[in-house]
């Protein structure tokens, strides 16, 4: 299931010890069917998942007002 998370870099401080309030967007895509696929299908599956995660990141950025 593809997932995109945006805005977390504003939450965690460089020290990594404490966080701070910030808006974060989490987008969860539809499951990508893998039944019946084999190792030879892996490059196409990787590209499908990659494209969907990029799309979800765009939606998350738009939601946070950071989209282009």
Image (cartoon, helix red, strand yellow):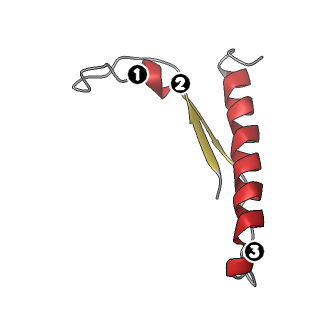
Residue at 78% x, 64% y is 44
Whole-number angstrom distance, CA of label 1 to CA of label 3: 38 Å
Local secondary structure at mark 3: helix
Q: Nearer the viewer, mark 2 or mark 3?
A: 3
Residue 7's tag is: 2
Q: Is residue 40 above or below residue 66?
A: below
Q: Quadrant of residue 14?
A: top left
Q: Nearer the viewer, residue 37 or 25?
A: 37
The spot of residue 54 in percent (x, y) is: 72, 40
Whole-number angstrom distance, CA of label 2 to CA of label 3: 33 Å
Local secondary structure at mark 2: loop
Q: Classify mark 2: residues with Cα within 10 Å, few (<14), some (14-19) or many (20+).
A: some
Residue at 71% x, 55% y is 49
What residue is shown with label 3?
A: 41
What residue is shown with label 1?
A: 11
Q: Is residue 46 above or below residue 17?
A: below
The total number of labels drawn is 3
Residue at 69% x, 60% y is 46
The spot of residue 59 in percent (x, y) is: 74, 31
| Disc 1 and disc 3 in contact, CB within 8 angstroms | no
| Disc 2 and disc 3 in contact, CB within 8 angstroms | no
Q: Nearer the viewer, residue 21 or 4?
A: 4
């Amino acid at each position: 299931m593809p997932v995109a998370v945006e805005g977390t870099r504003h939450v965690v401080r460089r020290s990594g010890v404490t966080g701070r309030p910030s808006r974060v967007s989490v987008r969860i895509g539809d499951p990508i069917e893998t039944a019946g696929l084999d190792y030879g299908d892996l490059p196409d599956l990787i590209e499908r998942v990659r494209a969907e995660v990029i799309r979800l990141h765009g939606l998350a950025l738009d939601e946070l007002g950071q989209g282009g």
